[in-house]
Image (cartoon, rainbow, N blue to C red):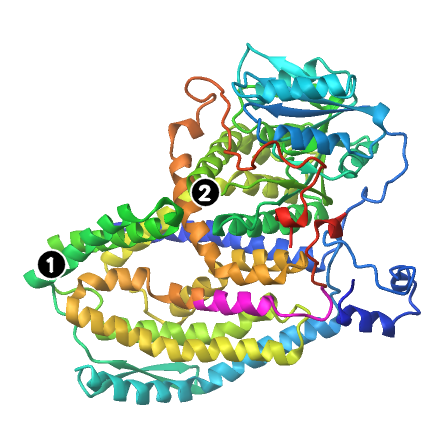
């Protein structure tokens, strides 16, 4: 059984022998075996992928100053609400001479660890490790993840046990860096989709919808993520900044990207048929 | 050069290795979707079919062996041109009784090879059994597999080409709806076969003979010195010996065979650690020989061969990268200094990490199983487990020894199928066939 997309495509091209050869006895389409399915690399497909990627990249870059200002308004409202300094810092990024992007960041200060920080963070690390041993075997990845977090945190504890101030990455600069890198990720979203999604057989509205969803989601997530990092570091000291950077930094954006991308790749296209439930389909 | 510079340099080397594998993911995926599709032997339906012996090595396979033998007996390959050789190697369960029952019911078609002495292990069992066979083509299946009726023809057809030394079919899990792990493994298998193996075939690189759904030509086997019973991965070992001797290995994406994937994480870890050790052993044996660029191999084939051999060594390299990045971070490396560095870091974070997901999503989409693609982010869980399990196996002494401590042995994956498996070949849709 063929999808209506394939059916309509072949209906338009019935004079072609290749398509005629796929007609069944009663005019139905004989679907290609999944081992043989490919997409045609046509100039139109290539041009659409390149144009969308390029246009998307330029549009996001052009929109970054606006996004920066919106982040400023969001942070300006949220930071005082959670007890932070009302004033924001602004990191300026010049893209050549054509664009100047302001990246706001909260001016929380990350304190050097004090005894109470050691107790809380050290205790949480030990607790995380212990909990990992209680996780049932069927949730093994969760067990590994908890141990991985505990290991990175333990390295951080080890570092601060011997280090002396100042820490190379003061909190405000770290947050500014995270958000600036986040802006670069926003700009790269259409580029990644250029060869990872736009080349497939989805309709143009769906291609644009995925781009808008990912960029929109990350644009909202990034300042909140930066704020959370700043808040936790301000409360728990610089002890927690390394695991936040390594594990809960840009990897979070990648997971969000992959999650939405995976959903979009499950959307119906126009050429690749969905295989039915029976294994007999494949023989 | 300061210590920080040394660490930074080492990290850049690690990143370079990872970038090479990332590019490889993109090339394979784009080739599979848009490249020239090569399946030159799949349409062969009528031929002077050679005599085939189908070997099924078994060690305690009572849960699955009956289903396997029934599926093979239902093959449409000319009955007088093939026979089945279940090899029982010291089973302590009912495997031998089941095999002997089949031999009684199908005299001449099922010819058991029973072993009670000699080296244990799949490679040794194959060496023993194939040495006593005069068939032209040897097909080899794992006991938990369920071949469809036309699979033997499809796997034998490439051998009509005298340059072909081995063929490999596609492995498809049939118990995918059991747990999250089986679903993730289904996605991984899909990426590995639908994209990786087929792209290698398209690009005339080095498709891998996987040892579970495939076959070897007897003359080729003898030419390369038969099975190596000291090998931890007799399939990868055979692939490289054939390639180095000038034989071709063919992958048949259309030739699907159903397998049972691990349903629990500990089983999966043991399986992938076994693969890692075997692969690394082959890396040690054939990596440098390949890098001498034998005259009959193209540069692309050599590079693909080396990258394929090194694929399990990437996990500890990645872990090393994390360790170096952590060290560099605490040494005060200016991570966010300059827009170029920032852009490079962001690029790798997005495009680099995205590559493997792109490959799997593409494979699942080509498979037409769209709903499964929504599990894509959960693959990160599998990657984490693989990363640690493979690293541990790679760093173990056994990975790099000529023979494992205590010599070769049976390393088995746990079976889950209840009873003796289905009575009539491949699984029903209710049993969890591909969706």
Residue B431, how many percent across, how many down? 62, 46
Question: Quick one: A194 or A127, which is closer to the camera?
Answer: A127
Q: Which residue is mark 2?
A: B264
Does B39 appear above or below A268? Answer: above
Q: Quadrant of the C terminus of chain B?
A: bottom right
Q: Which residue is mark 1?
A: A118
Residue A274, how many percent across, how many down? 69, 62
Q: Residue at x 68, y 46 (%)?
A: B428
Q: Residue at x 54, y 65 (%)?
A: A262
Question: Quick one: B398 or A62, which is closer to the camera?
Answer: B398
Crowd band around label 1 with a 10 angstrom C-alpha radius: few (<14), some (14–19), many (20+): some
Q: Along the horizontal axis of the image, is B108 left or right of B146?
A: right
Does A27 appear above or below B162? Answer: below
Q: Which residues are magenta?
A: A256-272
Residue B146, how many percent across, how many down? 67, 37
Q: Residue at x 38, y 38 (%)?
A: B392
């Amino acid at each position: 059984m063929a999808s209506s997309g394939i059916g309509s495509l072949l209906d338009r091209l019935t004079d072609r022998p290749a398509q005629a050869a796929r007609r069944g006895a009663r005019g139905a389409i004989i679907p290609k075996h999944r081992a043989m399915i490919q997409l045609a690399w046509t100039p139109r497909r290539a041009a659409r992928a390149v144009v969308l990627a390029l246009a998307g990249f330029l549009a996001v870059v052009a929109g970054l100053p606006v996004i920066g200002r919106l982040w400023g308004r969001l942070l300006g409202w949220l930071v005082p609400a959670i007890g932070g300094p009302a004033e924001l810092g602004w990191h300026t990024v010049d893209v050549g001479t054509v664009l100047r992007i302001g990246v706001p960041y909260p001016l929380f200060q990350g304190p050097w660890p004090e005894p109470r920080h050691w107790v809380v963070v050290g205790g949480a690390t030990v607790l995380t490790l212990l909990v990992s041993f209680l996780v049932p075997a069927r949730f093994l990845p969760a067990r590994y993840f908890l141990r991985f977090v505990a290991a990175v945190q333990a390295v951080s504890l080890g570092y601060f046990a011997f280090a002396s101030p100042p820490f190379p990455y003061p909190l405000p600069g770290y947050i500014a860096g995270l958000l600036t890198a986040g802006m670069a990720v926003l700009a790269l979203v259409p580029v990644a989709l250029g060869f990872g999604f736009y080349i497939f057989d989805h309709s143009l509205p769906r291609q644009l919808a995925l781009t808008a969803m990912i960029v929109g989601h990350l644009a909202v997530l990034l300042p909140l993520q930066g704020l959370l990092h700043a808040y936790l570091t301000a409360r728990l000291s610089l002890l927690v900044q390394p695991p936040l950077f390594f594990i809960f930094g840009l990897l979070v954006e990648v997971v969000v990207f992959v999650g939405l991308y995976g959903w979009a790749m499950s959307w119906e296209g126009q050429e690749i048929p969905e295989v039915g439930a029976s294994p007999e389909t494949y023989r | 050069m300061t210590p920080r510079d040394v660490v930074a340099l080492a990290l850049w080397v690690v990143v370079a290795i990872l970038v090479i594998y990332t590019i490889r993911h993109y090339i394979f995926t784009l080739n599979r979707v848009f490249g020239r599709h090569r399946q030159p032997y799949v349409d062969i339906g009528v031929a002077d079919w050679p005599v085939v012996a189908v070997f099924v090595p078994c060690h305690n396979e009572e849960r699955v062996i009956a289903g396997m033998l029934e599926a093979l007996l239902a093959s449409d390959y000319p009955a007088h041109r093939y026979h089945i050789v279940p090899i029982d190697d010291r089973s302590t369960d009912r495997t031998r009784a089941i095999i002997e029952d089949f031999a009684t019911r199908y005299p001449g078609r099922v010819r058991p090879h029973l072993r009670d002495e000699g080296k244990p292990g799949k490679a040794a069992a194959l060496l023993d059994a194939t040495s006593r066979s005069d068939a032209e083509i040897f097909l080899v299946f794992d006991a938990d597999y369920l071949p469809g009726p036309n699979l033997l023809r499809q796997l034998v057809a490439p051998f009509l080409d005298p340059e072909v030394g081995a063929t490999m079919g596609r492995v498809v899990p049939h118990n995918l709806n059991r747990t999250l792990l089986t679903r993730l493994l289904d996605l991984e298998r899909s990426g590995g076969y639908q994209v990786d193996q087929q792209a290698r075939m398209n690009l005339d690189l080095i498709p891998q003979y996987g040892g579970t759904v495939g076959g070897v030509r007897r003359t080729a086997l003898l030419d390369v010195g038969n099975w190596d019973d000291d090998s931890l991965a007799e399939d990868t070992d055979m692939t490289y010996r054939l390639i180095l001797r000038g034989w071709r290995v063919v992958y048949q994406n259309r030739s699907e065979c159903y397998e049972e994937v691990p349903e629990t994480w500990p089983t999966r870890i043991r399986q992938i650690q076994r693969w890692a050790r075997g692969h690394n052993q082959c890396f040690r044996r054939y990596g440098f020989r390949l890098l001498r660029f034998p005259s009959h191999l193209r540069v692309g084939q050599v590079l693909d061969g080396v990258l394929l051999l090194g694929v399990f060594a990437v996990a500890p390299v990645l872990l090393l990268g994390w360790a170096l990045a952590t060290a560099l971070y605490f040494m005060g490396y200016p991570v966010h200094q300059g827009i170029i560095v920032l852009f490079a870091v962001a690029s790798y974070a997005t495009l680099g990490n995205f590559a493997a997901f792109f490959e799997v999503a593409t494979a699942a989409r080509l498979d037409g199983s769209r709903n499964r693609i929504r599990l894509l982010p959960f693959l990160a869980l599998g990657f984490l487990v693989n990363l640690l399990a493979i690293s541990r196996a790679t760093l173990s002494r056994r990975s790099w020894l000529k023979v494992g401590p205590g010599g070769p042995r049976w390393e088995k994956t746990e079976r889950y199928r209840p009873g003796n498996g289905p009575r009539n070949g491949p699984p029903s849709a209710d049993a969890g066939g591909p969706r």
